[in-house]
Amino acid sequence: MNTTSPKTILVTGASRGIGKAIALRFAREGWQVAITCLQKKDQLLETAGEIEDAGGVCLPFVGDMGRMEDCRKLFEQIEEKFGGLDMLVNNAGISYVGLLQDMSEEEWDRLISADVSSVFYCSKLAIPHMIRRRQGRILNISSVWGVCGASCEAAYSAAKGGVNAFTQALAKELAPSGIAVNALACGAIDTDMNRWLTAEERQALFDEIPAGRMGTPEEVACMAYLLSEAPSYLTGQIIRLDGGWI
């Protein structure tokens, strides 16, 4: 990693939750940060403001990471402002809870675009700069359901399973260039994605998790930062962060 000038990270889906926590953590560590969201522009700009108020440098971008056209525009801005990336965190994604038979084709296409295509597009555009420098990190924020599957989340499980397989395969491709590719398979994290649970459902979930609670976005951010500092020999790993749940 470059130690003579500020390092740069892109965190997709960073207007709130896990993405925001990761962006703020890296900014506090002195990294330059690019952040994206699809719709919540006000929240994204609020995150950017927090970074800049703390003395950090931030590039906010509103766009759909499931569309290559938007990704190209983002990476052009990153190249112009920062010169390239040291680390990419593919965090953008959505979930779908419900019976597979009730899921529409449009909902399936939207989920695959947000959760899988975005990982492909952003990785494809980040790789050339990293290869030229023979260093870099790609971290995909995944889910334990990509490891074992969840009832009523078949599509989401399939998407995250695809991200996990993509991670392991791409790690083999990029290891000769000194680029590490890993995934964090998160368990139940206390974000808006889980706010639909009732108090009773939350307690039942806590009872299933040996740690007795949900994880926090800040804990995910801590792991992301640790992986940014890890040896490049640590690659191709699907690291479960789930309180011993799975």
Image: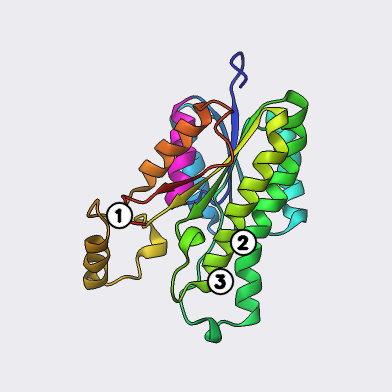
How far, Cα to Cα, is label 3 from label 1?
23 Å
Q: Measuring from the top left, give residue 229's x and y in whole percent.
A: 50, 26
Q: In the picture provided, is 98 more to the left or to the right than 6?
A: left
* Numbered range of the magenta stretch: 16-29
Q: Where residue 204 sits in the image (x, y, percent)?
A: 23, 68
Taking the image as shown, residue 112 lies to the left or right of residue 51, namely: right
User: Looking at the picture, which amino acid does disc 1 mark?
Assistant: Met
Closer to the eye: label 1 or 2:
1
Residue occupying the point 22% across, 54% down: 212
- The reply, left or right, for residue 152 in relation to residue 172 is left
How would you rate the neighbour count of disc 2 (Cα within 10 Å): few for under 14, some for 14-19, many for 20 or more? many
Q: Residue furthest top?
A: 4
Q: Describe the element under mark 2 as helix, strand or loop.
A: helix
Magenta stretch, overall SS: helix
From the viewer's side, name the closer residue of 71 and 62. Answer: 71
Q: Secondary structure at mark 3?
A: helix
Task: Kindly indicate whether the residue at mark 1 contacts the one at mark 3 (C-beta within 8 angstroms).
Answer: no
Mark 3 or mark 1, earlier in chain: 3
Residue 93 is inside the magenta segment:
no
Vertical comparison of 245 with 95: above or below = above
Q: Tell me where residue 31 appears, x and y as whole percent.
A: 53, 28
Distance (Cα) linking label 1 and label 2: 24 Å
- The numbered disc on residue 114 is 2
The label shown at residue 214 is: 1
Name which residue lies at 68% across and 44% down. 170
Q: Earlier in the sequence, mark 3 or mark 2?
A: 2
Query: Which residue, given by chain and number where applicable, does mark 3 sit on?
Result: 155
Q: Is residue 151 above or below residue 20?
A: below
Rendered-image quadrant of the C terminus:
bottom left
